[in-house]
Image: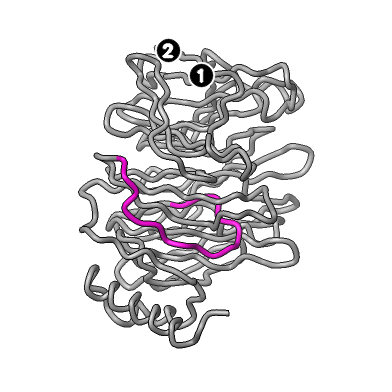
């Protein structure tokens, strides 16, 4: 039990930091009165010029000695600048808005429903806690003026909520329902104007819903069959859907990559990659880099090989690199001429292998930059 005086002193510290560091309107801090966090690491220096953020948790371990935390890292020196404790609920994805603030949505646990989305300053100070909908644990996406929060609701349909980036208030909500079919939110991606959402249905059917971020208008609904992306990358012309299950025929004859062309109406095409089962992808300068793990959908221990591939989305040129056998990754992003990956072994007893890694595209060398237990997802500056 935290001593009440210490508790309120920490609340005052948080409010003071938020007002002095980020210059927030006091109205945005009203939810801070209900914070139950036990600690906040006060940094001794100013925010790094290029902060890299890592979301860390042991979501597969019920009794973990490590808390759920948001790490703020100097993207030049690779030193940990700050750590912010997070709610103990399920947090698997996060994102950064055009102002540099960090948005984290939470799912529920056994016997409970997730409902919170938290907004943090660039320094890791909690600014606002929203309750926009049910199960908002997917990544929030953004236009220049609006945040779109995707929500899984009850699994039979999904919804989206829009938040004004100036006031941080929910301005509208929109349900995504299909007639005579379910829409279980599986994955999404965004290009800064629209958000593409994949909803799973019955008998391995699925639908893609293209949503305008600013208006929440549903621009198109495209029926598909058996797609299996964990996430999607998009630009102004196309969305790229890596199929993690392409190594097996259990989900149909899947291509390694499905591509949604943003024509009128939208059309789907396919692309083969040098290796099957791309799990995570990142798009930079018309180059799509993917991490491949064929074990995930088959659970076949013989499939030990792990790869990174590159696809030039304009020319179709490909390249591949092999990683150490059984090397699992939780995310991949492009940053400063290299690829960053996170690794979370899944057991606190083996956590020394966890952390933030860099992959050199010239040498093929994989280097651990930081030990971060339960490292999951990465957000980097533009």
Image spot of residue 157 (x, y percent): 67, 57
Quadrant (top left/top right/bottom left/bottom right) for the C terminus: top left
Q: Name above or below for residue 79 compared with residue 148.
A: above
Q: Is mark 1 on a helix, strand or loop?
A: strand
- What residue is at 44 percent from the left and 36 percent from the top? 233
Give the image quarter of residue 264: top left
| Label annotation for residue 106 | none
Residue at image position (79%, 38%) is 203
Considering depth in this image, is 186 or 334 the residue closer to the camera? 334
From the image, tell me which residue sits under label 1: 323
Q: Specify start and end residues of the magenta stretch as a single range.
A: 78-94
- Residue count near mark 2 (Cα–Cα under 10 Å), binned few <14, some 14–19, many ≥20: few
Q: Residue at x 60, y 55 (%)?
A: 65
Check the image and report above or below for 176 versus 237: below
**In the rendered image, which quarter contains the N terminus?**
bottom right
Query: Which labelled disc corresponds to residue 319?
Result: 2
Report if residue 33 lies within the magenta region: no
> Given the current orientation, which residue lies at the most extreme bottom position?
5
* For residue 155, side relative to residue 143 (left or right): right
């Amino acid at each position: 039990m935290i001593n009440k005086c210490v508790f309120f002193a920490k609340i005052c510290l948080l409010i003071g930091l938020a007002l002095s560091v980020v210059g927030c309107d006091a109205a945005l801090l009203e939810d801070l009165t209900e914070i139950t966090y036990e600690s906040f690491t006060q940094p001794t220096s100013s925010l790094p010029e290029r902060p890299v953020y890592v979301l860390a948790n042991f979501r597969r371990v019920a009794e973990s000695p490590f808390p759920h935390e948001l790490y703020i890292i100097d993207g030049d020196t690779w030193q940990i600048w700050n750590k912010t404790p997070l709610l103990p609920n399920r947090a698997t994805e996060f994102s950064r808005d055009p102002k540099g603030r960090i948005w984290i949505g939470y799912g529920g646990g056994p016997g409970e429903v997730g409902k919170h989305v938290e907004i943090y300053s660039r320094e890791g100070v909690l600014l606002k806690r929203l309750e926009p909908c049910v199960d908002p644990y997917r990544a929030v996406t953004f236009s220049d003026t609006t945040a779109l929060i995707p929500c899984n609701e009850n699994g039979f349909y999904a919804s989206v909520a829009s938040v004004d980036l100036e006031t941080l208030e929910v301005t509208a909500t929109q349900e995504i329902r299909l007639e005579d079919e379910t829409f279980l939110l599986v994955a999404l991606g965004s290009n800064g104007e629209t958000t593409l959402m994949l909803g799973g249905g019955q008998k391995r059917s699925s639908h893609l819903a293209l949503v305008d971020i600013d208006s929440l208008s549903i621009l198109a609904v495209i029926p598909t069959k058996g797609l299996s992306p964990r996430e999607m990358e998009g630009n102004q012309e196309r969305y790229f859907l890596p199929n993690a299950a392409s190594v097996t025929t259990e989900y149909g004859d899947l291509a390694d990559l499905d591509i949604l062309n943003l024509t009128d109406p939208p059309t789907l095409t396919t692309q083969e990659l040098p290796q099957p089962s791309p799990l995570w992808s990142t798009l930079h300068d018309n180059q799509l880099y993917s991490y491949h793990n064929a074990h995930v959908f088959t659970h076949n221990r013989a499939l030990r090989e792990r790869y990174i591939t590159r696809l030039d989305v304009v020319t179709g040129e490909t390249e591949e690199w092999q990683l150490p056998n059984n090397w699992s990754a939780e995310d991949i992003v492009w940053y400063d001429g290299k690829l960053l990956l996170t690794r979370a072994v899944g057991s606190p007893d083996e956590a020394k292998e966890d952390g933030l890694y860099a992959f050199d595209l010239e040498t093929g060398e994989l280097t651990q930059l930081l030990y971060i237990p339960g490292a999951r997802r990465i957000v980097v500056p533009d």
